[in-house]
Amino acid sequence: MSEERGTTTVPTDEPGGAPTDEAAPARPATFRAVPTVSLIAIGFLALCLSPIAFQGGAWFLLFGIPVAAAAWVVRSRTRVDTDGVHVRGVVRTRSMAWSEVATLRLVQRGWVHAVGSDDTDLELRGVRIRDLGRVGEASGGRVSAPSPAEAEAAAEHARELEAARMRIARLRERQDLEDETTDQAPDDQAPEDAGPDSR
């Protein structure tokens, strides 16, 4: 028998039955705000700035731009484990235990927010709606979230619904055009019919 919470299945022993294997501990998940591959672009930026920066004087401070950007890329991340969520910034790290999390606020085009019971809002950098399955697994079942396969199936269903809506809208437009053409046809033929009578 298994008890399923979110995307994590916790096996238990049936009374009088054979013992089952113990559940593997949930592995922490790390989400980066920006992929580390972007460090290549930052290095290229530093290379482009070097002719100006090496002119001497205050121009050398231009190197502070790629250095600050690289520090933000390397340090900005969200770590999810069974204890809670930990958001690391360039200077400090903010944490929120699962016992303090009241809900997760989903942003369609942005990062997920953890909302505390005291209305504290913590932006989970790098965590998007599509990552909720991994969040649920890393939390050890404390977050009820669809698995990646379930999320993909839901997204596919949403795409099919949108395609069906578009087809229906096109059919309605076509029907409206046909109705307009039908309504205008007798008006166009009226002068022709009146011609012989006028003679």
Image (spheres, grey):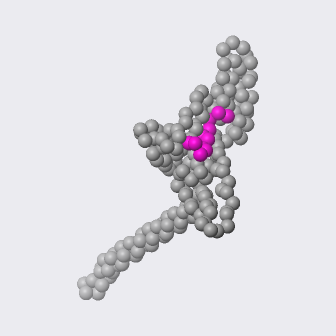
Q: How many marks?
A: 0
Which residue occupies 71% across, 41% down?
Answer: 37
| Residue 96 visible | yes
Seen at 45% across and 71% down, the residue is 168
Is 19 in front, or is 134?
Answer: 19
- In the rendered image, the vertical position of residue 53 relative to residue 23, given as above or below: above
Whether 82 is among the magenta residues is yes
Q: Where residue 34 sits: x, y (%)?
A: 64, 40
Question: On the picture, is 101 further left or further right than 38?
Answer: left
Q: Is residue 152 visible?
A: no
| Nearest the eye: 177 or 14 | 14
Q: Is residue 153 magenta?
A: no
Q: Is residue 114 above or below residue 44?
A: below
Classify the position of the C terminus by image quarter.
Answer: bottom left
Given residues 134 and 118, the one toward you in this image is 118
Give the residue at x 25% y 84%.
198
Quarter of the image with the N terminus in it: bottom right
Q: Quadrant of residue 81?
A: top right
Q: Position of residue 128 (x, y in %)?
A: 56, 48
Outermost residue toward the left in this view: 198
Q: Image quadrant of residue 60? A: top right
Give how far across and how far down residue 35 sits, in percent.
Answer: 67, 42
Per the rendered image, the range of residues in magenta is 74-84
Q: Position of residue 106 (x, y in %)?
A: 49, 49
At horizontal 52% and vertical 44% (from top left) the residue drawn is 98
Q: Is residue 196 left or right of residue 42?
A: left
| Residue furthest top in the image | 57
